[in-house]
Image (cartoon, grey):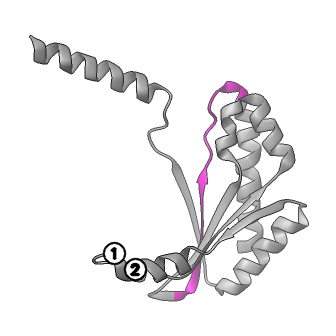
Amino acid sequence: MKTNITAKLLLLITGIYFSNTTWANTVISTSVDNTYEDIRSNLIDGIEQRALNISKIYHASDMLNRTKDSISNAKEIYHQAEIIEFCSASISHQLVLANHLNISACPFKIALYTLSNNSKQTHLVYTKLKPLDQQSEAPTIKANKLIQSLIENVTW
């Protein structure tokens, strides 16, 4: 009897927790046969040409390669990898006006990298944003279209 009540309580708590939580994100990936330097330069130019603010460039491969020796079984995955964080003031305002929790979507991020075993192919990756509610749908679509258009301009 006590086990049955505990199981039901655990199920109820889990259901409440996950009712407002996204189960999985959609990761969008594109690969091009072009140099990392060219893709990076074109992406930064595209962001700046739209008068968007680059808030940070995170040097992911540097950190991972620097710390790999302290992790057992770690190996060098990326030859080069960076995550570019940027902001559109207009879209960000629309997102947070729709739902204050949308601040978690800012800044927008695009990762670009080459793999250690194939440095001639450059990958671009981003996590597709999901609207938190109906009011967030339109600005979320705008944000996703902005990110996708930046990648399309780089990979054409």
Q: Can residue 156 be seen at all in this image of the molecule?
A: no
Residue type marked 1: Ile
Part of the protein shown in magenta = 119-135
* Residue for point 36% across, 83% down: 69
* Residue for point 76% across, 72% down: 43
Q: Is residue 58 above or below residue 141?
A: below
Q: Residue furthest top?
A: 1
**In whole angstroms, how far apart are the C-alphas of marks 1 and 2?**
5 Å
Are discs 1 and 2 less than 8 Å apart at CB? yes
Query: Could you say which disc has been placed on residue 68 in the image?
Result: 2
Dot 1 lies on which element?
loop
Query: Residue 59: x percent and y percent?
Result: 61, 75
Which is nearer the eye, 110 or 67?
67
Which is nearer the eye, 20 or 121?
20
Q: Is residue 102 above or below residue 84?
A: above
Residue type marked 2: Lys
Q: Can residue 69 be seen at all in this image of the molecule?
A: yes
Quarter holding residue 132:
top right
Q: Which residue is mark 1?
A: 71
Query: Residue 113: x percent and y percent?
Result: 57, 76
